Image: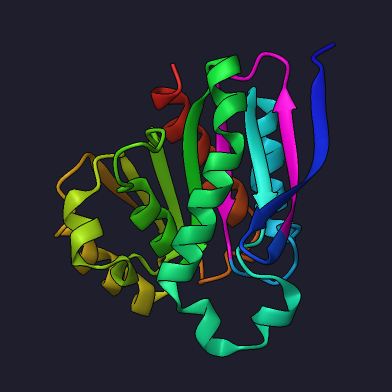
Amino acid sequence: MRLVAVKQVVIQVDNVALQGELTLPETATGLVLFAQVSGASGHTSRNRLIALMLNDVDIGTLLFDLLIPDEIVEPMRRFDIGLLCDRLRAATKFVEELARERRLRLGYFGSGTGAAAAMRAAAAPPGCMRIDAVVSRSGRIDLAGHEALSELTSPLLMIVGEADPFVLNLNVHAAARVTCKKRLEVIPGATNRFEEPGAMERVGKLAIGWFQDRFV
């Protein structure tokens, strides 16, 4: 039977404590950090489903929220990409020693404005561990900024619902400025929240393939 270690963690960033859940299969090849802004401490049903799917194929996950509940009520916090990016980088630093010890590849899975933070964090300054792959689900990658879009080297998979024309259009235009390996996948009939039957499972399968190909 495959062993999976689950640990509740606290990521301290300045005077804010981000609560998270670290899940690491015994034979994990990589670790994916979820960059989300939900106010639910990383325990949204959609991201938890994706995390479980990744765990089932020996990929570790760190589920946490980039904002604490008191901050989520401030609308502008969700769009403070600099703040979200700094916190994601702090979370990356938090797992760096573990990643080096276990020789784990690192990846980001971002949704909404969290995807913009993931892209900016992946285009990190020298001294940070390389992010081997980034997956964006309904991501506002247009908010990552021109510098991050042009300097990103981590392979990027963008997943958008067909019935979400606003975000789809933003992704198409932002992707044109990305020079690294990239792919845009459009899920037929899916809306922004991917609540349609089978839509989130399709997202999970695409994410698994993207990460597995780069965690070897």
Q: Is residue 21 magenta?
A: yes
Q: Is residue 54 above or below residue 40?
A: above
Q: Nearer the viewer, residue 95 or 184?
A: 95
- Quadrant in the picture for the C terminus: top left
Residue 123, given in percent of the width and then of the height, sits at: 30, 48
Residue 188 in view of the camera: no
Q: Is residue 117 above or below residue 97?
A: below
Give the residue displayed 72% in from the left and 61% down from the top.
17
- Quadrant in the picture for the N terminus: top right
Residue 162 in view of the camera: yes
Q: Nearer the viewer, residue 79 or 167?
A: 79
Q: Which is the main secondary structure of the residues drawn in magenta?
A: strand
Residue 150, given in percent of the width and then of the height, sits at: 16, 55
Give the residue displayed 56% in from the left and 25% down from the top.
99
Seen as rendered, the residue at the extreme front is: 14
Q: Nearer the viewer, residue 127 or 142?
A: 127
Q: Is residue 85 above or below residue 79?
A: above
The image quarter containing residue 182 is top left
